[in-house]
């Protein structure tokens, strides 16, 4: 009796306290998440409504008639999907995957060198890289297009991959260098003592330890490329066989009243894959991945 | 031994570098050869894909093969592709249509990047001479167009928009749109015995009558995101061209008279008679800049009583009418139209239009463009059915009806009575050379797509006409 | 921490934290530099050659699946193999030379690509900024004088400065708070709440512009029901609808909220991954010492991730300098909402006034210099402590 009463008195009290102290966290998180979701929620609801009612009533008015089937319509999705998006989807994938993989690989090597190697011009080069983040994309389009035209590569996939790689590199190098530079020098020194050279330190130690930052950059680069309109339009063109999703969507919405009714549905159709990628990479943002390895 | 390794490495580096150089060299050679095979691509390359196919194709008929570049998207773009399909079938060509939302910027990027389209059509005639002066376009004279005949068919006014510094023509009129239209709620007009106003003063009197009868005569909406203000410019232009005549109008957009000329101030004042009159404008004049132009027709359709009875807007606004309006059938709609009334006895037809520019004058390209502007092909472009009279059939999209850019276009090419009426107004205006373009499309972009729009917003919110016009004048580059 | 010398100072070879014995004296011979340049250029050259050799990659009609597969193999496998090959090649040199050349084999390809895609356009832009409208004649500083005297451009600059002060601060603060708090939730709750904040980043830009139409939408009386949620709230409380985006100066704030909404996801994700990297032992130790969660955060977590905070802040600042599409679509810079980047795009692609557009771009380059200096200081501090 006594034994059983005694033990619980200690633990629940502690738990209770910690749970109680978490209430402010729950409330704050919920409020922020709620505020952040409202705009998207409005879009989601409108994407399932008749185009006429989108224009006549606010999306929140449906909350009173959620179970009325007349409220909802799949018409917008049908129109969007009927447009033969298959080809555009394939094009977008063909653009996106290499446009993410190529800059990440190149940036990782550069970031490692910036973080762990010493060479003349290092700081100058690194500052240049960071400074290049500010070069507006729009300024680069015409000069690059001129060169592409001279070499006759406009309208090809490699042309777009390399352009995306170029435009994404500064952020990639910057993020990766910051992360790699913050890894404790002890692990690298110990590896060095074991006789490993730079290449194997990079491949066997740094890259596995940098998975979280590689994953986060991959997400952003993927999103950027997936949702990009300008680069694809300029370097790939509007020829029907090479159009990417965003170009197709802009065309679908046109300038007319279609914008308000079709764009919400289209936005969700194009959002599916980025969200899948986000959830897939979510598991790399796990506590202790780096800490664990460092300790070991 | 070590030294030897050293040298070997240097040789390897050199070889790799050399190999790369060779590769690039070879590639350029091949492309040059390819391009030589077909004159089409020699002038303006359009990526590898097109070229390869062009080179391998030994079609007996010299059909054109290019991507026609323009602004319309969505159903309008599909209607143009339908038209091209008909032409392709007829001529053995392979012309595709590519439309882009931000057509003007894209065209500029492509031209600057050395990768212009073969043929494009622009809604902004101001850009034609910009490209021509830089030597990117081929003149109509060089392509063997008959200028006099074209001036007769498509109006001298339109042809002159493409008349550039070297005295040659570079713009080929294709299809216009029409803006001197007032939509009105017919049942209310009938029930109250309102007559269609034919003069400006009658229109003011009618508006006052409507106010006295407890209703609101006008709907306005100037909001259009980054282009807010443009619907106001249309009003001002329609007034100016009637009040001061076509010559003053032309002097105005050519900047031969300043933007703040007294004639313009007086057009503002005329507009103000209606715009600022008590109770004339639904929601109040000060809120007009906040009403989306696409929302402006909404109150015409409210039940049981319309919120307003009249709206001036271009023919395209019917795309924003509710589906329930039955407007696409033309017949049953409660909303009808009348032409913008006369001022001091002067009439006018104001609108815009798409004008073709040729960057690559390969014979088959020229042949295609020459065909498209004939009355017969205009008929095919006109509507989805071509009214049953189109020589090559109608190949468009239901509900999309393109107005004619050729004075002789058969009005029976149109399906709806509404479009027939617009087309009639446009063809007779073209024949009489009284069709004028929306001046904001003809002014430099700093003004026509900038300060003029902004000026209309400020004016609608109470800034004086003189101050607005002075500001716009100061912004003229 | 001492103030580091100006950017661009070349660090000496070797040094206390370099690998192996410090590489001393000058390997700065011409030959070594040639090798460095060559090692930097070989890889991109091979990649380019590869694209030309495999001509089918240029064929738009070619099977896309094959293209993607080839690209992935080239992107991951090929690029890795090339780096590996380069590393082997370099290693064949005498150790002294190899050590001097190797970093360039690592950094070089990135620098070569950047030189082509960004440095060259940037230099081009700087040149254009001293030329007239259509880049036909040099006009000296005329474009810059215009920017700094014309009230229109001055308002752009003022607005941009306000954006840069407000948006990164808000996005980083909210992102950091959220990442820290979400870290204390259960795995599943964390994943769900984080993805809600992340969601805006996944919406394509065309979609995002519509999203905010349904928030800020305005219809004066007589034009039907409100379709914007803010005015929905205002009118249901008996107020009259507000024209959010046309009421200066507050419209600037409403536009900034859109960017904060978009960027918080970015800062949250990056900061979250940094927080995950803070060793548990340290936090546990602090807790055992009786620190509250608040104290533990400021004493342990924040110092550990401060360099990431600077990185995120820098990135968001640069994004804000470059923001144009939000303003472009929502107001077009009307109603005193113009910002530098949107004005730049407008000058470049609407007015075709290349000179002014380029000068505005150069202004953006210059504006980030202080941020670069902060970053160099951070990185030196980071290297000093590790």
Image (spheres, coloured by chain):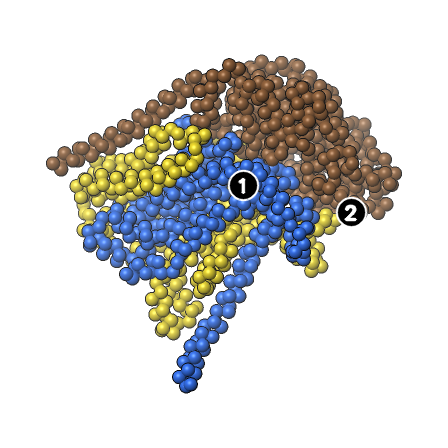
Residue at 20%, 54% (x, y): give it: A194
Residue C280 vs residue B326: left or right?
left
Identify the image quadrant of residue B189. top right
Q: Chain of mark 2?
A: B
Residue at 20%, 42% (x, y): give it: C91
> Which colour represents chain C?
yellow
Residue B272 vs residue B161: left or right?
right
Place of residue A7 in the rendered image (x, y in percent of width and height, measured from the top left):
41, 80
Place of residue B246 in the rendered image (x, y in percent of width and height, measured from the top left):
72, 25
Identify the image quadrant of residue A209. bottom left
Residue A139 vs residue B234: left or right?
left
Quadrant of the frame with the C terminus of chain B:
top right
> Which colour represents chain B?
brown
Place of residue A54 in the rendered image (x, y in percent of width and height, measured from the top left):
66, 48
Callout count? 2
Between residues B172 and B92, which one lies in front from this camera angle? Answer: B92
- Classify 10 Å Cα crowding around label 1: few (below 14), some (14-19), many (20 and above): many
Instruction: Identify the residue under disc 1.
Output: C343
Quadrant of the frame with the N terminus of chain B:
top left
Q: Chain of mark 1?
A: C
Give the secondary structure at mark 1: helix
Residue B342 vs residue B321: left or right?
right
Instruction: Identify the residue under disc 2.
Output: B303
Place of residue A147 in the rendered image (x, y in percent of width and height, measured from the top left):
41, 30
Give the secondary structure at mark 2: loop
Q: Is any atom of residue A138 visible in this view? A: no
Residue at 67%, 57% (x, y): give it: A64
In the orientation shown, which residue stands out farthest toward the left?
B1
């Amino acid at each position: 009796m006594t034994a059983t009463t005694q033990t619980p008195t200690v633990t629940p009290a502690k738990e209770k306290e910690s749970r109680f102290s978490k209430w402010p966290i729950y409330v704050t998180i919920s409020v922020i998440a709620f505020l952040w979701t409202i705009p998207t929620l409005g879009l989601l609801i409108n994407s399932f409504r008749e185009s006429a009612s989108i224009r006549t009533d606010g999306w929140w008015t449906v909350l009173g008639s959620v179970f009325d089937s007349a409220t909802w319509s799949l018409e917008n999705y049908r129109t969007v999907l009927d447009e033969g998006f298959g080809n555009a989807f394939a094009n977008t994938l063909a653009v996106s995957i290499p446009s993410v993989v190529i800059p990440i690989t190149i940036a990782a090597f550069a970031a490692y060198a910036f973080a762990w190697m010493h060479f003349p011009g290092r700081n100058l080069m690194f500052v240049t890289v960071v400074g290049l983040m500010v070069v507006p994309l729009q300024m680069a389009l015409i000069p690059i297009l001129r060169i592409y035209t001279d070499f006759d590569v406009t309208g090809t996939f490699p042309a777009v991959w390399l352009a995306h790689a170029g435009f994404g590199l500064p952020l990639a190098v910057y993020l990766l260098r910051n992360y790699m530079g913050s890894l404790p020098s002890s692990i690298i020194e110990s590896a060095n003592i074991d006789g490993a050279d730079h290449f194997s330190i990079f491949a066997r130690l740094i890259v596995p330890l940098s998975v979280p930052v590689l994953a986060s950059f991959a997400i952003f680069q993927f999103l950027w490329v997936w949702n990009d309109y300008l680069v694809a339009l300029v370097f790939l063109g509007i020829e029907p066989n090479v159009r990417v999703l965003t170009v197709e969507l802009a065309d679908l919405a046109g300038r007319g009243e279609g914008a308000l009714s079709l764009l919400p549905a289209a936005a969700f159709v194009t959002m599916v894959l980025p969200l899948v990628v986000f959830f897939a990479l979510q598991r790399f943002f796990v506590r202790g991945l780096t800490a664990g390895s460092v300790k070991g | 031994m070590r030294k030897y390794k050293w040298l070997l490495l240097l040789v390897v580096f050199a070889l790799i570098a050399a190999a790369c150089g060779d590769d690039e060299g070879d590639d350029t050679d091949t492309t040059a050869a390819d391009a030589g095979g077909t004159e089409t691509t020699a002038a303006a390359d359009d990526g590898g894909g097109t070229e390869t196919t062009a080179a391998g194709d030994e079609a007996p008929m010299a059909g054109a093969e290019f991507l026609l570049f323009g602004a319309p998207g969505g159903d309008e773009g599909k209607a143009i592709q339908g038209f091209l399909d008909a032409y392709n079938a007829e001529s053995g060509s392979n012309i595709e249509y590519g439309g882009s939302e931000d057509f003007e910027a894209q065209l500029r990027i492509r031209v600057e990047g050395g990768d212009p389209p073969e043929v494009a059509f622009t809604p902004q005639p101001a850009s034609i001479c910009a490209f021509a002066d830089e030597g990117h376009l081929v003149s109509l004279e060089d392509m063997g167009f008959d200028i006099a005949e074209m001036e007769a068919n498509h109006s001298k006014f339109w042809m002159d928009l493409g008349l550039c510094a070297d005295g040659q023509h570079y713009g080929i009129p294709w299809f216009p749109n029409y803006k001197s239209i007032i939509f009105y709620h017919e049942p209310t007009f009938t029930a109250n015995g309102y007559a269609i106003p034919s003069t400006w003063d009658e229109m003011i009197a009618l508006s006052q009558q409507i106010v006295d009868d407890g209703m609101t005569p006008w709907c306005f909406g100037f909001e259009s995101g980054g282009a807010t203000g443009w619907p106001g410019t249309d009003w001002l232009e329609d007034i100016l061209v009637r009040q001061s005549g076509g010559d003053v109008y032309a002097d105005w957009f050519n900047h031969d008279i300043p933007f703040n000329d007294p004639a313009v101030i007086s057009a503002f004042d005329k507009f103000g008679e209606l715009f600022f009159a008590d109770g004339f404008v639904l929601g109040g004049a000060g809120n007009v800049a906040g009403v989306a132009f696409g929302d402006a027709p909404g109150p015409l359709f409210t039940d049981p009583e319309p919120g307003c009875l009249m709206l001036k807007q271009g023919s395209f606004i019917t795309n924003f009418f509710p589906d329930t309006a039955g407007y696409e059938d033309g017949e049953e709609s409660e909303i009808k139209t009348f032409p913008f009334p006369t001022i001091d006895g002067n009439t006018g037809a104001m609108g815009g239009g798409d004008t073709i520019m040729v960057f690559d004058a390969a014979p088959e390209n020229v042949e295609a463009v020459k065909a498209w502007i004939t009355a017969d092909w205009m008929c095919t472009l006109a509507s989805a059915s071509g009214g049953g009279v189109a020589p090559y059939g109608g190949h468009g999209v239901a509900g999309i009806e393109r107005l004619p850019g050729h004075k002789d276009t058969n009005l029976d090419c149109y399906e709806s009575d509404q479009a027939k009426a617009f087309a009639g107004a446009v063809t007779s205006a073209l024949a009489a050379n009284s069709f004028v373009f929306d001046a904001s499309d003809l002014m430099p972009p700093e003004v026509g797509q900038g300060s003029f729009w902004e000026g209309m917003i400020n004016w609608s919110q109470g800034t004086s006409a003189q101050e607005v016009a002075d500001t716009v004048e100061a912004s003229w580059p | 921490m001492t103030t580091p010398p100006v950017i661009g100072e070349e660090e000496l070879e070797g040094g206390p934290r370099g690998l192996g014995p410090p590489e001393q004296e000058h390997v700065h011979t011409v030959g070594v530099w040639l090798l460095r340049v060559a090692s930097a250029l070989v890889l991109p050259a091979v990649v380019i050659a590869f694209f030309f050799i495999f001509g089918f990659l240029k064929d738009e009609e070619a099977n896309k699946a094959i293209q993607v597969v080839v690209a992935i193999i080239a992107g991951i496998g090929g690029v890795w193999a090339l780096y590996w090959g380069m590393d082997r090649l370099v290693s064949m040199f005498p150790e002294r030379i190899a050590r001097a050349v190797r970093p360039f084999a690592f950094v070089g390809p990135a620098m070569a690509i950047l030189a082509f895609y960004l440095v060259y356009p940037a230099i081009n832009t700087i040149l254009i900024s001293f030329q007239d409208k259509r880049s036909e004649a040099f006009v000296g500083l005329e474009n810059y004088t215009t920017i700094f005297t014309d009230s229109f451009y001055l308002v752009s600059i003022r607005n941009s400065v306000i954006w840069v002060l407000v948006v990164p601060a808000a996005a980083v603060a909210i992102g950091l708070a959220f990442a820290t708090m979400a870290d204390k939730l259960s795995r599943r709750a964390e994943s769900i709440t984080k993805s809600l904040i992340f969601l805006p980043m996944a919406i394509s830009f065309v979609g995002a512009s519509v999203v905010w139409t349904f928030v800020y939408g305005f219809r004066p009386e007589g034009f039907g029901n409100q379709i914007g949620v803010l005015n929905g709230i205002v009118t249901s409380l008996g107020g009259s609808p507000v024209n959010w985006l046309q009421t200066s100066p507050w419209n600037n704030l409403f536009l900034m909220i859109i960017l904060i909404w978009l960027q918080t996801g970015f800062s949250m994700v990056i900061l979250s991954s940094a927080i995950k990297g803070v060793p548990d032992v340290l936090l546990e130790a602090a807790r055992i010492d009786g620190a509250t969660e608040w104290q533990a955060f400021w004493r342990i977590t924040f110092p550990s991730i401060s360099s990431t905070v600077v990185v995120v802040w820098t990135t968001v600042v640069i994004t804000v300098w470059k923001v144009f599409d939000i303003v472009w679509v929502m107001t077009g810079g009307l109603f005193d909402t113009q910002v530098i980047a949107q004005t730049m795009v407008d000058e470049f692609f609407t007015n075709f006034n290349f000179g002014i557009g380029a000068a505005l771009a150069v202004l953006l380059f210059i504006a980030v210099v202080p941020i670069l200096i902060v970053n160099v200081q951070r990185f030196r501090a980071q290297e000093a402590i590790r």
